[in-house]
Image (tube, grey):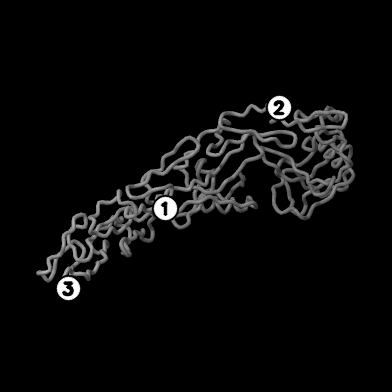
Amino acid sequence: MVGVNERLVEICYNSTWGLVCDDQWGANDNNVQVVCKQFCFESGEKGKICPNVRDGIFWLDEVNCTGDEGRLDNCAHNNIGEHDCTLAEAVTVICSTNVCLEGTRCTQDGNFACECNNSYTKDETGYKDIDECTMNVPNCTKHSMWKNIQGSFYCMCKPGYSCGEDGYCTDIDECAMNTTHNCTNGTSECSYECAMDTQNCTRNCSKCVNTPGSYFCMCCLGYTGNDCEDMDECENPTLNNCDVNAMCINTCGSFSCMCNDGYFGSGTHCELCNPEKPFCLGYTKNCTGILFYEHCAIDNIDECALGLDDCDENAICTNTEGCYICTCREGYCGDGRNCTVSDASTGIRLVHGNETSGLVEVLHNCEWRSVCDDYWTDEDAKVACRQLGLLPYGMHIIA
């Protein structure tokens, strides 16, 4: 729609909308009359050229109507798609007042008439929208709910479920997904979550377990919660077996015990240092001094240098205070404990489709993520297709 009664003219061919252009469009009043009647206006007033069209394809050129046709594509014209037009030559029409009120539809059988739409009713005040949801009219499937819109309604899947090709809502396996953006298709019969923010389980979580409409993380020993945070066993005496004369030290996913000053042993069993000996050997500390050896030095263990880490062979081990960090080397992806070769040859892929169509994902920091763009166009799609190694043609579809 360009103005109140001014409309950009497009026709649908092979399920794709295309523009119309004609050098003599404004001079042929019959073209305007046919288009306006097809739009359910009483008559046409003027044909114009719209110079502000940003993108699109052309289906019709050299249109020549007699005025008796019921549809524009029934008029004489060049072959579909055959044209010599630029985007600045797309045509519009200015029509007279619409004879059909809101809530009615125009029917054409030689002449036109106005009939009540299925989702509207008429009373003494005029045409009104029927709220199908309050009348229990919608027949939405299991795990879905309905939403009323002006002149209609649609069914949308409940959180944790997605709409399949058969129109039924099925449980989303959050554990198998790796995208984060929510999309809603509000124009079809079934709305669906095309991507879920799944709060993926962290690297300390050994397994993500899917449940109907949700999921939970099964953590490795020593970790707890949905984020699998390190459990401090030292805060709860029942979670560690340190000796009463030992100090409990929390570590990554575990703990260690160290005998107090003046004691030696494994930490789970500590004995008083012998004052007659210059040194008493413990597991991770040395006793110094003479009487009760009150000054003891705790040595930080370098797990990386001693080979006590569990980093992948393609990862770098970095020692920290009381722990260590595993980081995958350049060209590899993973949590440091498991590193695989990064598939970054193209940096782009298609998912939930086939080799030539699907949801676009790009690789960033070893993670595949979806692309979201309110102004995604055919030109953007062509660039993606070329990057994927496909033919340099692409059609954009925003789910």
Query: Whole-percent x and y of residue 269?
Result: 18, 55
Query: Whole-percent x and y of residue 1?
Result: 78, 46
Answer few, some or many: residues within 10 Å of disc 1's Cα (few below 14, many 20 plus, some between 14 and 19): few
Do the numbered discs 1 and 2 sit on residues whose CB atoms are within 8 Å?
A: no
Label 3: which secondary element: loop
Q: Amino acid at mark 3?
A: Gly
Label 2: which secondary element: loop
Report the mark closest to the observer, 2 or 3. 3
Taking the spot 45% from the left edge, 40% from the top edge, the residue there is: 215
Taking the spot 47% from the left edge, 44% from the top edge, the residue there is: 177
Do the numbered discs 1 and 3 sit on residues whose CB atoms are within 8 Å?
A: no
Where on the picture, by quarter, is residue 291? bottom left
Between the C-alphas of marks 1 and 2, the distance is 53 Å
Write down the residue under mark 2: 135
Q: Amino acid at mark 2?
A: Met
**First of labels 1, 3 by sequence position:** 3
Write down the residue under mark 3: 289
Write down the residue under mark 1: 343
Q: Amino acid at mark 1?
A: Asp
Q: Nearer the viewer, residue 5 or 287?
A: 287
Report the mark closest to the observer, 1 or 2. 2
